[in-house]
Amino acid sequence: MSGGHGAVDSSNKKVALLISVLALFLALGETLAKSAQTDALGANVEASNVWAYFQARTIRSTVLKTAGEELTLASQGVPSDAVRKQLDDWAKTMARWESDPATGEGRKELAAKAKAAEEKRDLALARYHHYEIASAAFQIGIVLASAQVITGIVALAFAGGALGIAGIAMVAIGLFAPHAVHLI
């Protein structure tokens, strides 16, 4: 301290400002991380639900196919008109379950939806990991800058500032190019 009681050294004001800026970016990084984490969880649930529906369609189709084979065998290879009609109906249903662009509920469309949800999940997780590393850099930067105020070791403030810059870089990577740097 210089001056009288209550006066704050100019270098301490700069460090306090650095700590405030780091805390601001920490709040931003944590908010982005939580949002990305929520997006990843939502996309993961969506992918799981769509894959479950895909699997249900597969099972139902297999049941119809098996029933058709049994019906053909039971008619001793010479199906009646009623049996042929039933087999045709089942064949149409199985074809619709395989691909139904009108409703988007065919297996082909469901697989595409599930893969899109998985990609969304993977993107959100990549962002999340970058934001978490950025938050850690901001937190450590705050600790180092705070230690400079106590110890007077200027290098601690510079290290805190460098970590803040590294944290900003990680936030930028998370926002604009989450797949550019593979962390986890």
Image (cartoon, grey):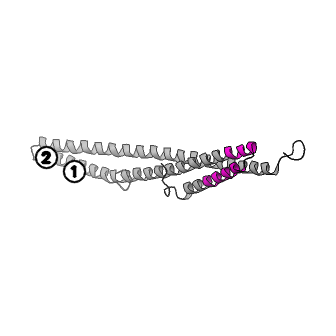
User: In this rendering, is residue 98 above or below 64?
Assistant: below
Name which residue lies at 64% across and 55% down.
165
Mark pair 2, 1: CA separation? 12 Å
The answer to if 146 sits in the magenta stretch is yes
Foreground mark, 2 or 1? 1
Residue marked by disc 1:
88
In the image, the segment drawn in magenta is 142-167
User: Mark 2 belongs to which amino acid?
Assistant: Ser
Total tally of numbered discs in the picture:
2
Question: Dot 1: within a 10 Å radius of its alpha carbon, few (fewer than 14), some, or many (20 or more) residues?
Answer: few
Name which residue lies at 25% across and 41% down.
63
Where does residue 21 sit, x and y in percent of width and height?
70, 51
- The residue lying toward the viewer, choosing from 138 and 128, is 138
The answer to if 80 sits in the magenta stretch is no
Per the image, label 1 sits on a secondary structure element best described as helix
Residue marked by disc 2:
80
